[in-house]
Image: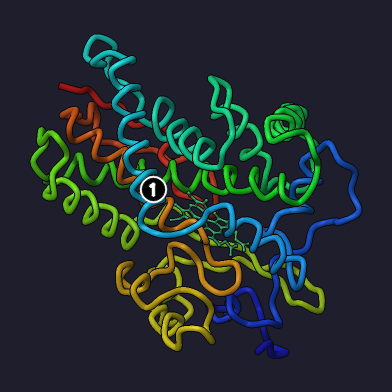
Amino acid sequence: MRTSDDTRTNVGLDVLTDPDWVVPPVPQDVPEGGMAWLRARVARFSSGEAHVRRRALAAGLLGGGEDAADALRDAARVRTEGLLDGAGKGAETGGVDLMARVARVVPAEVLAGFLGLPVTAETAELVGHVARAYHAHGGTVAAADRALARLVSVCGGTWDEATAARIGLLVQAYDATAGLIGNAAFRMLTGDPPDRSARPVDAAVTAGVTDWLDRTLSADPPVRGTLRAPADGGEPVRISLVTDEVELHGESLGDVSRGGESRGDVSPDDAALAGGALPFGAGPHACPGRAHARALAAGVLEALLVRGCRLVRPDLAYEPSANLRVPVKLEVTCA
Ligand code: HEM
């Protein structure tokens, strides 16, 4: 529950499951045609009944079950292998930039196809334009507004909540999944990867990739924080989802995962997997795309292994962001 002495320093993960705290609201009375419309219609920035309704739309599109994950994983692996082949071995040019050529392309394209949208050469770029302006409330970004209009037309041209849900999924996935791929690929390729050249992909490669994803989600998650605001008004505060930052507040992240339903829809498995951190959030806004994100990233990592990719440089810089950890560039060469 909210208390009178809540401050930026003593607010912990409990607020993610506390009805007295909400995602910072966005203006609802906005015209069609721009990014403010998208923010006003997706689950991510909604609360209460509107959130329940919009989240159900998103979850319905994502579907469930092993089959969806297997299909995404296979599609991501095949598409990544194709892109790596198309980019050459990378040796002459100093390397293929995995972030630009793969991590920021494959999840958007594969997810768009999964959602029933036609995939073209511009799909990933359009999603990228929208994603870059998604959290930048206030200002107008003409390129993002134009890209959003194109995506709405690709979705059938109707500016309604169902269209917003589809585009919202692509946009939510864009940075976070790129970050998961980049951080996991960096760990895997600087670590001790499983057998590199197994083909077809065998159980050892699959298990090895799962292990690298688990380690990344535990130690180096791409989404580091989120915002919440008191439901009765007041300034938003940043909530850290990363263990070391949260320990500064004396919080036990493990506690948030206990109690199942009453503490939100994070499962004890997720928390254990992540070593206590909450890489996919918790509570009513917890990520509904966890299995999809993992499957997409796994397919990409598998392709890197079967193509015998190696890192060109073992140093890493991250995109400037308070809440995301996404490598700027990751150069690899392939066998
Ligand atoms: C296929 C990939 C993904 C999809 C489709 C997806 C979708 C979504 C959606 C729709 C939401 C908003 C849910 C709501 O407001 O009710 C969300 C929230 C979230 N997602 Fe994902 N996501 C994906 C990948 C990821 C990845 C890779 C991570 C990090 C490892 C991540 C972390 C989160 C977190 C922490 C939230 C909660 C944000 C908050 O409470 O403010 N997502 N995701």
- Side of 76 relative to 127 (left or right): left
Q: Mark 1 is on which residue type?
A: Leu
- According to the picture, the residue beneath numbered tag 1 turns out to be 180
* Res 87 → quadrant: top left
Name the quadrant of the N terminus.
bottom right
- Residue behind label 1 places its C-beta within 8 angstroms of ligand 1: yes
* Res 201 → quadrant: top left
Instruction: Identify the residue at image location x=73%, y=34%.
Output: 156
- Side of 6 relative to 259 (left or right): right
Mark 1 residue crowding within 10 angstroms, few (<14) / some (14–19) / many (20+): many
Name the quadrant of the C terminus.
top left
Instruction: Identify the residue at image location x=70%, y=60%.
Output: 54
Q: Position of residue 89 (x, y in %)?
A: 23, 16
Q: Which is nearer the eye, 184 or 138? A: 184
Does 35 appear above or below 273?
Answer: above
Callout 1: SS: helix
Q: Position of residue 104 (x, y in %)?
A: 46, 33
Q: Which is nearer the eye, 26 or 190? A: 26
Q: Position of residue 58 (x, y in %)?
A: 62, 56
Q: How many marks?
A: 1
- Side of 193 relative to 245 (left or right): left
Does 256 appear above or below 278?
Answer: below
Does 277 appear above or below 137?
Answer: below
Q: Position of residue 4 (x, y in %)?
A: 73, 89
Judged from this view, the residue extending furthest toward the top is 92
Instruction: Identify the residue at image location x=69%, y=35%.
Output: 155
Instruction: Identify the residue at image location x=31%, y=41%.
Output: 299
- Side of 109 relative to 101 (left or right): right
